[in-house]
Amino acid sequence: MKSPSPAGGQSSRVSVIIPNLDGEAWLEACLASLSAQTRKPLEVILVDNASTDRSLAIVQDKAPEAIIIRLDRNTGFAHAVNRGAAIAKGDFLLFLNTDTVVAPACIKILENTLAGAPDDIASVMPLMTMLQKPDLVDDAGDVLSWYGYAQKHGHGEPAAHYHEQAEIFSPCGGAVLYRAGVFSRLEGFDEGFFAYLEDVDLGLRCRLAGYRHWLQPAARVQHKGHGSAMPKTRYLALTTRNRMALLIKNLPARLLYRHLGELLYGQVHFAFSHGNLKALMSGMALLARDLPSLLRKRRSVRTTTVLEGSDIEGLLSREHPKPSIRELISRRLRQFSWKSDPI
Protein backbone atom coordinates (compact mmCIF):
# COMPACT_ATOMS: atom_id res chain seq x y z
CA MET A 1 0.00 0.00 0.00
CA LYS A 2 1.39 3.42 -0.97
CA SER A 3 1.65 6.27 1.48
CA PRO A 4 -0.31 9.37 0.50
CA SER A 5 1.66 12.09 -1.23
CA PRO A 6 1.80 15.35 0.70
CA ALA A 7 -0.30 18.02 -0.93
CA GLY A 8 1.25 21.30 -1.96
CA GLY A 9 0.25 23.07 1.24
CA GLN A 10 0.63 20.12 3.60
CA SER A 11 3.33 20.11 6.27
CA SER A 12 6.51 18.28 5.40
CA ARG A 13 7.34 14.91 6.94
CA VAL A 14 11.06 15.36 6.27
CA SER A 15 13.73 15.70 8.95
CA VAL A 16 17.00 17.05 7.57
CA ILE A 17 20.13 15.68 9.26
CA ILE A 18 23.48 17.39 8.62
CA PRO A 19 26.70 15.97 10.10
CA ASN A 20 29.28 18.72 10.49
CA LEU A 21 33.00 19.01 11.12
CA ASP A 22 34.52 22.48 10.67
CA GLY A 23 32.13 23.25 7.84
CA GLU A 24 32.03 27.04 8.15
CA ALA A 25 33.10 27.49 4.52
CA TRP A 26 29.95 25.72 3.29
CA LEU A 27 27.26 25.91 5.97
CA GLU A 28 25.87 29.34 5.19
CA ALA A 29 25.04 28.44 1.58
CA CYS A 30 23.67 25.04 2.60
CA LEU A 31 21.38 26.50 5.27
CA ALA A 32 20.25 29.31 2.98
CA SER A 33 19.20 26.75 0.37
CA LEU A 34 17.13 24.92 2.99
CA SER A 35 15.43 28.17 3.99
CA ALA A 36 14.52 28.77 0.34
CA GLN A 37 12.69 25.44 -0.10
CA THR A 38 9.23 25.56 -1.62
CA ARG A 39 8.26 23.05 1.07
CA LYS A 40 10.08 23.67 4.30
CA PRO A 41 11.34 20.57 6.13
CA LEU A 42 9.77 19.53 9.40
CA GLU A 43 13.07 20.16 11.20
CA VAL A 44 16.79 20.62 10.61
CA ILE A 45 19.14 18.70 12.90
CA LEU A 46 22.84 19.51 12.82
CA VAL A 47 25.18 17.07 14.56
CA ASP A 48 28.55 18.69 15.24
CA ASN A 49 31.66 16.53 15.53
CA ALA A 50 33.53 18.88 17.90
CA SER A 51 34.20 21.62 15.35
CA THR A 52 36.81 24.23 16.23
CA ASP A 53 35.72 26.82 13.66
CA ARG A 54 32.69 29.16 13.55
CA SER A 55 30.27 26.45 12.39
CA LEU A 56 27.91 26.62 15.35
CA ALA A 57 27.83 30.40 15.38
CA ILE A 58 26.81 30.33 11.71
CA VAL A 59 24.01 27.85 12.42
CA GLN A 60 22.71 29.88 15.35
CA ASP A 61 22.74 33.03 13.22
CA LYS A 62 21.39 31.69 9.93
CA ALA A 63 19.12 28.89 11.19
CA PRO A 64 18.21 29.64 14.83
CA GLU A 65 15.39 27.10 14.69
CA ALA A 66 17.80 24.26 13.92
CA ILE A 67 18.39 21.58 16.54
CA ILE A 68 22.09 21.26 17.37
CA ILE A 69 23.65 18.15 18.85
CA ARG A 70 27.16 18.89 20.13
CA LEU A 71 29.58 15.96 20.35
CA ASP A 72 32.76 16.22 22.38
CA ARG A 73 34.96 14.56 19.74
CA ASN A 74 34.98 13.66 16.07
CA THR A 75 32.90 10.48 15.99
CA GLY A 76 32.73 10.23 12.20
CA PHE A 77 29.95 10.60 9.64
CA ALA A 78 28.10 7.38 10.50
CA HIS A 79 27.75 7.99 14.24
CA ALA A 80 26.80 11.65 13.75
CA VAL A 81 23.99 10.81 11.32
CA ASN A 82 22.74 8.01 13.56
CA ARG A 83 22.58 10.42 16.50
CA GLY A 84 20.51 12.84 14.46
CA ALA A 85 18.22 10.10 13.17
CA ALA A 86 17.61 8.87 16.73
CA ILE A 87 15.81 12.11 17.69
CA ALA A 88 14.26 12.92 14.30
CA LYS A 89 10.47 13.21 14.20
CA GLY A 90 9.98 12.87 10.46
CA ASP A 91 8.75 9.83 8.53
CA PHE A 92 11.52 10.59 6.03
CA LEU A 93 15.16 11.42 6.75
CA LEU A 94 17.15 13.66 4.42
CA PHE A 95 20.87 13.17 4.97
CA LEU A 96 22.85 16.12 3.71
CA ASN A 97 26.54 17.03 3.58
CA THR A 98 27.55 20.54 4.60
CA ASP A 99 29.14 21.21 1.18
CA THR A 100 25.81 21.09 -0.65
CA VAL A 101 23.34 23.58 -2.08
CA VAL A 102 19.79 22.23 -2.38
CA ALA A 103 17.60 23.38 -5.29
CA PRO A 104 14.38 25.14 -4.12
CA ALA A 105 11.96 22.34 -5.07
CA CYS A 106 14.25 19.47 -4.09
CA ILE A 107 12.70 18.47 -0.75
CA LYS A 108 9.17 18.68 -2.14
CA ILE A 109 10.05 16.50 -5.14
CA LEU A 110 11.94 13.92 -3.09
CA GLU A 111 9.20 13.73 -0.46
CA ASN A 112 6.41 13.37 -3.02
CA THR A 113 8.39 10.72 -4.88
CA LEU A 114 9.15 8.59 -1.83
CA ALA A 115 5.70 9.03 -0.27
CA GLY A 116 4.10 7.82 -3.50
CA ALA A 117 6.58 5.01 -4.15
CA PRO A 118 6.04 1.30 -3.45
CA ASP A 119 6.95 0.22 0.07
CA ASP A 120 10.07 -1.59 -1.12
CA ILE A 121 11.68 1.68 -2.20
CA ALA A 122 13.95 2.48 0.75
CA SER A 123 15.35 5.76 -0.53
CA VAL A 124 15.23 8.38 -3.25
CA MET A 125 18.34 10.29 -4.23
CA PRO A 126 18.46 13.61 -6.08
CA LEU A 127 20.80 14.12 -9.02
CA MET A 128 23.97 15.55 -7.51
CA THR A 129 25.77 18.03 -9.73
CA MET A 130 29.13 19.73 -9.32
CA LEU A 131 29.00 22.91 -7.26
CA GLN A 132 31.30 24.85 -9.58
CA LYS A 133 29.95 23.21 -12.76
CA PRO A 134 26.26 22.52 -12.12
CA ASP A 135 25.71 21.39 -15.70
CA LEU A 136 27.89 18.34 -14.95
CA VAL A 137 26.98 15.32 -12.81
CA ASP A 138 28.79 14.70 -9.56
CA ASP A 139 26.87 11.55 -8.59
CA ALA A 140 23.85 9.79 -10.08
CA GLY A 141 23.98 6.84 -7.70
CA ASP A 142 26.80 4.64 -6.47
CA VAL A 143 27.99 1.39 -8.05
CA LEU A 144 29.94 -1.41 -6.34
CA SER A 145 32.09 -3.89 -8.28
CA TRP A 146 33.40 -7.36 -7.49
CA TYR A 147 36.86 -5.77 -7.50
CA GLY A 148 35.86 -3.84 -4.37
CA TYR A 149 35.55 -0.48 -6.10
CA ALA A 150 32.66 1.83 -5.24
CA GLN A 151 32.22 4.54 -7.85
CA LYS A 152 29.95 7.46 -8.66
CA HIS A 153 27.74 6.65 -11.61
CA GLY A 154 27.68 9.36 -14.26
CA HIS A 155 30.46 11.46 -12.73
CA GLY A 156 31.47 14.20 -15.17
CA GLU A 157 28.64 13.54 -17.61
CA PRO A 158 26.22 16.30 -18.73
CA ALA A 159 23.38 16.62 -16.24
CA ALA A 160 21.00 17.06 -19.18
CA HIS A 161 21.43 13.35 -19.93
CA TYR A 162 19.55 12.51 -16.73
CA HIS A 163 15.87 13.35 -16.93
CA GLU A 164 14.04 10.12 -16.06
CA GLN A 165 13.56 8.44 -12.71
CA ALA A 166 15.61 5.25 -12.50
CA GLU A 167 16.58 2.46 -10.13
CA ILE A 168 20.13 2.63 -8.78
CA PHE A 169 22.35 0.23 -6.81
CA SER A 170 22.92 2.56 -3.84
CA PRO A 171 22.43 6.26 -3.05
CA CYS A 172 25.18 8.65 -2.03
CA GLY A 173 24.96 9.53 1.67
CA GLY A 174 25.77 13.15 0.87
CA ALA A 175 22.20 13.81 -0.30
CA VAL A 176 19.51 11.15 0.03
CA LEU A 177 16.00 10.78 1.45
CA TYR A 178 15.43 7.53 3.38
CA ARG A 179 12.31 6.07 4.93
CA ALA A 180 12.86 6.43 8.68
CA GLY A 181 11.34 3.00 9.30
CA VAL A 182 13.74 1.24 6.94
CA PHE A 183 16.72 3.13 8.31
CA SER A 184 15.75 2.08 11.84
CA ARG A 185 15.01 -1.54 10.91
CA LEU A 186 18.48 -1.95 9.37
CA GLU A 187 20.08 -0.15 12.34
CA GLY A 188 21.28 2.85 10.37
CA PHE A 189 24.83 3.43 9.26
CA ASP A 190 27.52 1.06 10.51
CA GLU A 191 29.56 3.23 12.87
CA GLY A 192 32.55 0.93 12.45
CA PHE A 193 33.07 2.56 9.05
CA PHE A 194 33.67 5.95 10.74
CA ALA A 195 33.67 7.70 7.33
CA TYR A 196 33.60 6.66 3.65
CA LEU A 197 31.56 3.84 2.11
CA GLU A 198 29.14 3.63 5.04
CA ASP A 199 26.48 4.78 2.57
CA VAL A 200 27.31 1.96 0.14
CA ASP A 201 27.26 -0.51 3.04
CA LEU A 202 23.75 0.61 4.03
CA GLY A 203 22.64 0.67 0.39
CA LEU A 204 23.84 -2.91 -0.06
CA ARG A 205 22.19 -4.09 3.16
CA CYS A 206 18.94 -2.58 1.93
CA ARG A 207 19.23 -4.45 -1.35
CA LEU A 208 19.96 -7.73 0.42
CA ALA A 209 16.85 -7.18 2.58
CA GLY A 210 14.71 -6.79 -0.55
CA TYR A 211 14.57 -3.00 -0.77
CA ARG A 212 15.44 -0.83 -3.76
CA HIS A 213 16.70 2.72 -4.35
CA TRP A 214 15.64 5.33 -6.89
CA LEU A 215 17.31 8.29 -8.55
CA GLN A 216 14.98 11.28 -9.04
CA PRO A 217 16.80 13.69 -11.41
CA ALA A 218 14.01 16.28 -11.18
CA ALA A 219 15.41 16.98 -7.70
CA ARG A 220 18.86 18.58 -7.76
CA VAL A 221 21.63 19.14 -5.21
CA GLN A 222 24.92 20.84 -6.02
CA HIS A 223 27.88 19.23 -4.27
CA LYS A 224 31.46 20.39 -3.76
CA GLY A 225 32.82 16.96 -2.88
CA HIS A 226 35.48 16.42 -0.18
CA GLY A 227 34.55 19.78 1.30
CA SER A 228 35.19 18.29 4.72
CA ALA A 229 37.98 15.97 3.58
CA MET A 230 40.49 14.44 5.96
CA PRO A 231 44.23 14.05 5.26
CA LYS A 232 44.95 11.76 2.29
CA THR A 233 46.82 9.09 4.27
CA ARG A 234 43.94 8.74 6.74
CA TYR A 235 41.43 8.71 3.86
CA LEU A 236 43.31 5.92 2.05
CA ALA A 237 43.64 3.85 5.24
CA LEU A 238 39.90 4.07 5.98
CA THR A 239 38.95 3.41 2.37
CA THR A 240 41.21 0.34 2.24
CA ARG A 241 39.61 -1.02 5.42
CA ASN A 242 36.05 -0.17 4.42
CA ARG A 243 36.24 -1.55 0.85
CA MET A 244 36.98 -5.02 2.15
CA ALA A 245 34.82 -4.69 5.27
CA LEU A 246 31.57 -4.09 3.38
CA LEU A 247 32.16 -7.20 1.24
CA ILE A 248 33.26 -9.49 4.09
CA LYS A 249 30.40 -8.32 6.27
CA ASN A 250 27.58 -8.53 3.74
CA LEU A 251 28.19 -11.12 1.00
CA PRO A 252 27.73 -14.91 1.15
CA ALA A 253 30.94 -16.91 1.58
CA ARG A 254 30.39 -18.89 -1.62
CA LEU A 255 30.23 -15.68 -3.65
CA LEU A 256 33.32 -14.26 -1.97
CA TYR A 257 35.15 -17.48 -2.82
CA ARG A 258 33.87 -17.45 -6.42
CA HIS A 259 35.10 -13.89 -6.90
CA LEU A 260 38.27 -14.18 -4.83
CA GLY A 261 40.49 -13.51 -7.84
CA GLU A 262 38.70 -10.24 -8.62
CA LEU A 263 38.76 -9.17 -4.98
CA LEU A 264 42.52 -9.75 -4.70
CA TYR A 265 43.14 -8.05 -8.03
CA GLY A 266 41.14 -5.05 -6.83
CA GLN A 267 43.23 -4.71 -3.68
CA VAL A 268 46.51 -4.88 -5.62
CA HIS A 269 45.16 -2.41 -8.17
CA PHE A 270 44.15 0.00 -5.40
CA ALA A 271 47.66 -0.25 -3.92
CA PHE A 272 49.35 0.54 -7.23
CA SER A 273 46.85 3.31 -8.02
CA HIS A 274 47.69 5.34 -4.93
CA GLY A 275 51.27 4.29 -4.23
CA ASN A 276 50.94 4.96 -0.50
CA LEU A 277 52.15 1.75 1.14
CA LYS A 278 51.92 3.16 4.67
CA ALA A 279 48.24 4.07 4.28
CA LEU A 280 47.39 0.75 2.67
CA MET A 281 49.12 -1.26 5.39
CA SER A 282 47.33 0.83 8.02
CA GLY A 283 44.03 0.04 6.34
CA MET A 284 44.73 -3.69 6.34
CA ALA A 285 45.71 -3.48 10.02
CA LEU A 286 42.38 -1.82 10.78
CA LEU A 287 40.60 -4.59 8.87
CA ALA A 288 42.43 -7.29 10.84
CA ARG A 289 41.62 -5.54 14.11
CA ASP A 290 37.92 -5.31 13.26
CA LEU A 291 37.50 -8.76 11.72
CA PRO A 292 35.84 -10.34 14.81
CA SER A 293 33.21 -7.57 14.96
CA LEU A 294 32.65 -7.79 11.20
CA LEU A 295 31.95 -11.52 11.49
CA ARG A 296 29.45 -10.85 14.28
CA LYS A 297 27.72 -8.22 12.15
CA ARG A 298 27.77 -10.65 9.23
CA ARG A 299 25.52 -13.02 11.19
CA SER A 300 23.10 -10.14 11.78
CA VAL A 301 23.05 -9.25 8.07
CA ARG A 302 22.15 -12.84 7.21
CA THR A 303 19.00 -12.58 9.35
CA THR A 304 17.65 -9.73 7.20
CA THR A 305 18.81 -11.06 3.81
CA VAL A 306 16.02 -12.30 1.54
CA LEU A 307 17.80 -12.36 -1.84
CA GLU A 308 19.11 -15.59 -3.32
CA GLY A 309 22.75 -16.01 -4.33
CA SER A 310 22.15 -15.45 -8.06
CA ASP A 311 20.29 -12.21 -7.36
CA ILE A 312 23.05 -11.01 -5.03
CA GLU A 313 25.72 -11.79 -7.61
CA GLY A 314 23.96 -9.63 -10.17
CA LEU A 315 23.89 -6.61 -7.85
CA LEU A 316 27.63 -5.97 -8.18
CA SER A 317 29.34 -4.77 -11.33
CA ARG A 318 32.01 -6.81 -13.12
CA GLU A 319 33.63 -3.75 -14.67
CA HIS A 320 37.40 -4.13 -14.72
CA PRO A 321 39.27 -1.28 -12.96
CA LYS A 322 41.17 1.01 -15.31
CA PRO A 323 43.97 1.45 -16.10
CA SER A 324 45.22 -2.12 -15.70
CA ILE A 325 47.86 -3.08 -13.13
CA ARG A 326 50.31 -3.59 -16.00
CA GLU A 327 49.75 -0.02 -17.18
CA LEU A 328 50.06 1.32 -13.62
CA ILE A 329 53.39 -0.47 -13.17
CA SER A 330 54.58 0.88 -16.52
CA ARG A 331 53.71 4.43 -15.46
CA ARG A 332 55.56 4.04 -12.17
CA LEU A 333 58.64 2.74 -13.97
CA ARG A 334 58.56 5.64 -16.43
CA GLN A 335 58.29 8.13 -13.56
CA PHE A 336 61.19 6.46 -11.76
CA SER A 337 63.28 6.43 -14.95
CA TRP A 338 62.55 10.13 -15.60
CA LYS A 339 63.52 11.11 -12.04
CA SER A 340 66.68 9.01 -12.24
CA ASP A 341 67.95 10.54 -15.50
CA PRO A 342 70.98 12.79 -14.95
CA ILE A 343 70.54 16.44 -15.89
Image: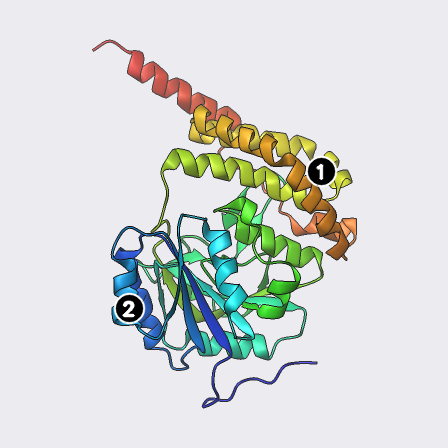
Regarding mark 1 in the picture, which secondary structure is present there?
Answer: helix
Distance Cα–Cα, label 2 vs label 1: 49 Å
Using the image, tell me which numbered label, if any, was put on residue 256.
Answer: 1
What residue appears at the point 62 percent right and 76 percent down from the top-left corner? 117
Regarding mark 2 in the picture, which secondary structure is present there?
Answer: helix
Does the image show residue 148? no
Image position, residue 26 (x, y; %): 29, 59
Quarter of the figure with the N terminus? bottom right
- In the rendered structure, the answer to whether residue 12 lies left or right of residue 20 reads right
Q: Is residue 145 shown above or below 199?
A: above
N-terminal of the pair, mark 2 or mark 1, is: 2
Identity of the residue furthest to the front in this view: 72
Residue density around tag 2, few if under 14, some if 14–19, many if 20 or more, within 10 Å: few
- In the rendered structure, the answer to whether residue 120 lies left or right of residue 132 reads right
Q: Quadrant of residue 213?
A: bottom right
Identity of the residue furthest to the top in this view: 342
Image position, residue 95 (x, y; %): 47, 63
Given the image, on which type of amino acid does mark 1 rest? Answer: Leu
Observer-nearest residue: 66 or 159? 66
Given the image, on which type of amino acid does mark 2 rest? Answer: Gln
What residue appears at the point 40 percent right and 77 percent down from the top-left corner? 105
Image position, residue 38 (x, y; %): 38, 82
The mark lying in front, picked from 2 and 1, is 2
